[in-house]
Amino acid sequence: MKKIEAIIHHFKLDEVVEVLRAIGVTHVVVTEARSFGRQRARSEIYRASVEYGQDFIPKTKIEMTVPDDLQVAVVEAIVKTARTDKGGDGKVLVMNVVEATSIHTGKKEG
C-alpha cells in the first residue's frame, strides 16, 4: 500500500479529484496549505479576504492511500491533470505504508 501526497494549485482540485475517482481512488483528504519555492509570490487576495505576501502561495494538499498496483496510474493522473506548465505546479510524494487500521471497523490493511 502507498500513501500519495500531492501539493497542487487550489483551482485544479476539482479536476484532479474527478480524474482520481475515474481510476478507482475512493478516499481523499484535502487540506488548504501555503507554500513557497523557487517562484516568488506576489501579494494577492485569496478568497476575497486573506492577502498573501512574502513567499507564501495558496495551495491545496491532497492525500490518499492506494494499493501498490494503482500507484503509477494515480501519480500520472495527478501530474497530467494538475500541470499548468508554469512554475509552482507542485509536487507528488509517494511513501510506503506499513499498516493502516480502520477506526470504524478495526480492520487492518497492509
Image (cartoon, rainbow, N blue to C red):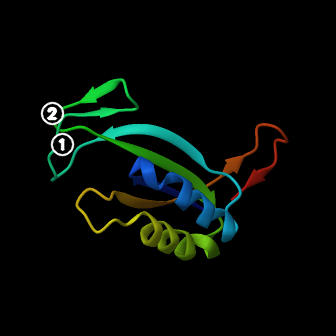
How crowded is the residue under tag 2: few (<14 C-alpha within 10 Å), some, or many (20+)?
A: few
Amino acid, disc 2: Gln
Q: Secondary structure at mark 1?
A: loop
Kindly identify the residue that appears in the image at 70 percent across and 67 percent down: 24
| Residue 30 to residue 96: above or below | above
Identify which residue, 77 or 72, lies in the foreground: 77
- Does residue 32 appear left or right of residue 66 in this picture? left
Residue 108, how many percent across, how many down? 76, 51
Which residue, given by chain and number where applicable, does mark 1 sit on?
A: 41
Amino acid, disc 1: Ala
Which residue, given by chain and number where applicable, does mark 2 sit on?
A: 54
Residue 84, how many percent across, how many down? 34, 65
Report whether residue 1 is seen: no
Kindly identify the residue that appears in the image at 68 percent across and 59 percent down: 110
Kindly identify the residue that appears in the image at 68 percent across and 69 percent down: 22
Are the two marked residues, 2 and 1, in contact with CB atoms closer than 8 angstroms?
yes
Furthest toward the top, the residue is 49
CA gap between label 2 and label 1 equals: 6 Å
